[in-house]
Image: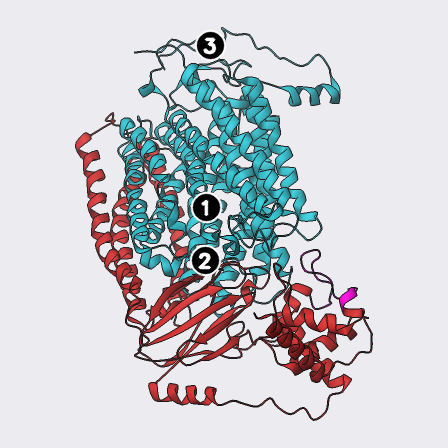
Chain colours: A red, B cyan
Amino acid sequence: MVKQEEMKREKSAFAFVGRALACITIMIPTAALALADDWEINLPRGVTPMSRDIYDLHMTIIGILAVIGVIVYGVLIYTIIRHRHSKGAKAATFEKNLTLENIWTLIPFLILIGMAVPATLVMMDMDDVTGADLTVKITGSQWKWHYSYLDQGIEFYSNLSTPPDQIHGDAKKDAWYLREVDRPLVLPVNKKVRFVVTSTDVIHSWWVPELGIKRDAVPGFIYQAWARIDKPGTYRGQCAELCGVGHAFMPIVVKAVDEKTFSRWVTQQEKAHPAPRITQWTMETAMAKGKALFDRQCAACHQENGSGIPPLYPALSTSSVTVGAPISRHIDLVLNGVPGSAMQAYGPQLDDADLAAIITYERNAWGNDTGDLITPDQVRERRSTQRTRQDNNQP
Amino acid sequence: MTMPTQEDAIPEQPIRNGRRGLVGFLKHWLFTTNHKDIGTLYLCLSLTMFFVGGAMALVIRAELFQPGMKVIDPDFYNVLITMHGLIMLLAVVMPAGIGLANWMIPMMIGAPDMALPRLNNMSFWILPCAITLLASTIFMKGGGPNFGWTLYAPLSTTFGPPSTDFLIFSVHMLGISSILGSINIIVTIINMRAPGMTWMKLPMFVWTWLVTAFLLLCIMPVLAGTVTMLLADRNFGTTFFDAAGGGDPLLYQHLFWFFGHPEVYVLILPAFGVISQIIPTFSRKKLFGYGRMVIATGAIAFLSLLVWAHHMFTSGLPLGAELYFMYATMLIAVPTGIKVFNWVATMYRGSLSFETPMLFAVAFIFLFTFGGFTGVMMAIAPSDYQYHDSYFIVAHFHYVLVPGAVFAFLGAVYYWLPKWCGRMYDETLGQWHFWLTFIATNVTFFPMHFLGLAGMPRRIPDYALQFGDFNAIASVGAFIFGFAQLIFLYNVIHTIRSGKKASAQVWDGAEGLEWTLSSPPPYHSFQTPPKIER
C-alpha cells in the first residue's frame, strides 16, 4: 500500500518534471536555431566607440540580471519540485523575517548603484558633441531623409529605392529589401561627425544600430548626436518613430569611407552637374517616368490608383486640380505644397523633368484623360515666375 | 476557518424589477446597482473586448507573418495598432480590474455592497458608450486614428484624420468612468470595512486597489487635460504642441507620459493583488512579509509618478533630465523586487498544489520577473537608445502585460468563479488552457526581443528580409494564443451553466471573509457585519 502511494507520488513528480522538460525542449531549439550564424539575436557591437560602450553596458547588465535570475528562478523551481502538497509537504508557519526582507531591499539597491555608475559615464560621453570635425544636418520628412553637409555645402534627399512591385509581392525581393536608398549618406571614418537632427512635419527618429545612434527628429527643434566611425562599410537603419503611412519605408544607409575617398566624393558633388538633356518628350515617355516617380513619391498618401485617403489625402482621380484648368494651378501646387497640411513642396526635391512627368501622369492616369502633356519648360517657367514674385516682395 | 459561515443566516433575495422576459432582463442589467451585477457586467465587457482586441492583434500578426504588404494596407495597419493598444488597455485590462474590485472588495472587507451604488451603475454604463464611440472611428471617413495609442502630436494634430476628435471624446468618457469608479472604491474601502477590519488586516487585493484608485485620481485628470489640448490644437487654432506657434511637441510627450507611465501600474497593481491572494491559498501558508508588501505597493505607486520621461530618452532631453529619470526608474526595481522575493518566500516550504489559478500565478512570477529584467535594462538610458521604439520594447511590455495583468486576471477568474456562481470549473480544460496560453505567450513574445536587438523598429507593417524568421514564429504563437482563449470562454460558460456544485470554502487553503459566504454568495454580501478575530 505504502509503496503504491510512494509510486504515485513519484509519478506525479515525474509528470511535473516532464512538463518542465516539455517547456525547455521548446525553448532550447529556439535558442539553438537563433544562435546559428545568420540569425541575429543580439545588439550589434557596432563600429563606433559609442556603440561598443552601449554594447558592453548592455552585456554587463544582462550578466548581472542573469545571476539574479538564476537565484530567484532556482529557489522557485526548487520549491515547486520539493514543497508539493501531493508529496505530502507540510506548510511551515513563518510569515515574516525582517532581516531577510531588509537584505533583499538593500542588496538590489546596491546592485542598482553599481549599474548606474557606468551608465552615467556613457551617458555623459554620449551627450558631449563638442570638437566635431564635420557637421551633417539630418532632416526627416514624410517619408524620406534629407542630408546637408553644412561646411561643404552639399545637400540631397535620400529616398527608399525598393520598387513597389517588390513590396506588393509581384517581384522577387532583393537582399536589401526596404533597406536600400537612392543616395546614401557618405561619411569619412575616424572623424568626429556631429549630427543635428530636425524634421519638417511630424516626429521621425534617425536610428542606425551599428553607429549606436537613435535621435528623434522633432519639427521646430534641433537635437544633436555624434559618431566616430572606425571601420569603412555600409551600415543600415531606418526611421524608428511612427511617422504615418510610410513609416516602414524610410530607410537609412550610411556609407563610411576613408578620408581620401571622402574628399574625392566631396569634390565630385561640388562640380555642378548639368541636367541631362531631354532628347524626346512624348506622352509615352512622360507617362512611364511619371508612373515610376508617382508610385515612389506620392502613392503612400494619394494611393497608386489615385483614390487618396480623403479628406486628409485628397483623391487625384476626381480632383478639380488634376483635371481642371489652369494647368499652372496644378504645377504650383506640386511645386510649393500646401502649408499647414501633409502636402510637401516638391520644388526643392525634384527637377523640372521629374515634376513635368509626375504632373503629366496625374492629369492622364486613372481616367483623368485630359490629354495634357506638361513639358519641363512649363515647370521651369512656373518656378521662375514664383522666384520673381518672391524677389519683388523683398523690401 | 475560525469565522462563522453565513451560509444559512441570510436568505437569498432574488431581486428582479418585477418584469419577466426581455424587458425585465434589460431593465435589470441596465438599472442594477448591485456590486456583483456590476462586477459581472465589467467582466463580460472586458472578455468581449479581449476577443475584439485580440482579433485585431491577429490581423496585425497575419500581416507580419512574411515580408511584403499582403493582408492590409499600411494606413489600416496603423489604425489597427492604435485600436489594439487602446482597447487592450482601456477596454480590457482596466475593466477587468474594476470588475474584480466590484465583485471582491465588499466581500473581502465585510460590506453589503459598494458605498455608492448608483455612481457604480453610471461608471459602468459610460464605458460601453465610450468604447462604442472609440471603435466606431474605424468606420469613419478618412479612416480611424492611425498614430498609435500614444497619440503623439503633431501626427495626431495636423496630420490626424477627422475621427481623432471622436477618439478624444471617447478618452474623456473613459476618464470620467475611471474617476467615478476610483472614488467609489476609495470611499468603500475607507468607510465600509467591518468592525475589526483594521488597515493592516486588509487583504492585499484590497490594498492594491486602494492605492490604484488614488493613482487613477492623480493621472486621469492630466490625461483629460492633455487630450483637450490636442482637441484645441486641432480645432481652435491653439499651438500647444506646434513649434510654429511657440509650442513644443515634447510638451505633449511629457504630459502624456505623466499619465501613461502610472497607467501601466494601474494595470499591474491589481494584478499584484490577485497574485498575493492566490499564492498563499495554494501554498497553504500566510503571505510572507505582508507589511513590507503594503509598503512596496505604495512605494511603486509613488515612484511611478516621478519617472515618466524614461519613455522619452531619445526625444531630446538635457543630460540632467536623462540621468535623473534613469536613476528614479531604476529605483522602482527595489519595491518590485520585494514583491517577487516575498511571493517566492510565501511559496517556500509551503504545501503547494497546482490547480489552474496557481499555475497562472506561478507563470506570472516567472514571466513578470523576466519582463522586470528587461525593464531594468531599459532604465539604463544609454542602452535604451538602442532599445527604444524597437521590438525589444514591444517584447518587454507584452511580457509585463500579458503574463502580468492578463495571466493574473485569468487566474483570478478561475480562483473566484466557483465562489461567484457556486459551480466548479473543469480542471482539465483549465490546465489545457493554461499550458497552451503559457507556451503560446513565449513563442509569440520571446522572439520579439531578438527582433528588436537586431534592429527592427516597432509599428511597421513591412520589414527587411533579415527579420522574417522570428516574425513568422511570433505569428504562429499569436494564433495559438488567440484560439486557446476559446477554451477559456467555453470553460466559463460551461461552468456557469452546468458545472459541479462548489462548496463555500472552495479551496482548502483559502482564507478571508469572502470564503465565509455561501457559493454563490447572497445578493447583498454581508447584511450584518461579520465578527473579525483580533
Q: Position of residue B383 (x, y in %)?
A: 33, 59
Count of all numbered marks drawn on residues in the image: 3
Q: Tell me which numbered mark, 2 or 1, is placed earlier along the sequence.
A: 2
Residue A60 lies within the magenta run:
no
Chain letter for mark 1, please.
B
| Chain of the residue displaying label 2 | B
Residue nearest the viewer, comparing B39 with A384: A384
Q: Chain of mark 3?
A: B
Dominant SS of magenta comes to loop
Q: CA distance from mark 3 to mark 2?
A: 52 Å
Left or right: B144 with respect to B305?
right
Q: Residues within 10 Å of mark 3 (few under 14, many from 20)?
A: many
Residue B87: % across, % down: 57, 42
Quadrant showing the N terminus of chain B: top left
Q: Say the numbered circle drawn on residue B438.
A: 1
Residue located beneath label 3 in the image: B6
Q: Residues within 10 Å of mark 2 (few under 14, many from 20)?
A: many
B166 relative position to B220: left or right: right
Q: Give the residue type that dot 3 points to.
A: Gln
C-alpha span from label 1 to label 3: 38 Å
Identify the magenta region: A303-321
* Secondary-structure class at tag 3: loop
Looking at the rendered structure, the secondary structure element under dot 1 is helix
Q: Position of residue B145 (x, y in %)?
A: 61, 50
Disc sitting over residue B391 in the figure: 2
Whether residues under marks 3 and 2 lie with C-beta atoms below 8 angstroms apart, the answer is no
Q: Residue furthest left?
A: A99
Q: In the figure, A166 relative to A242: above or below? A: below
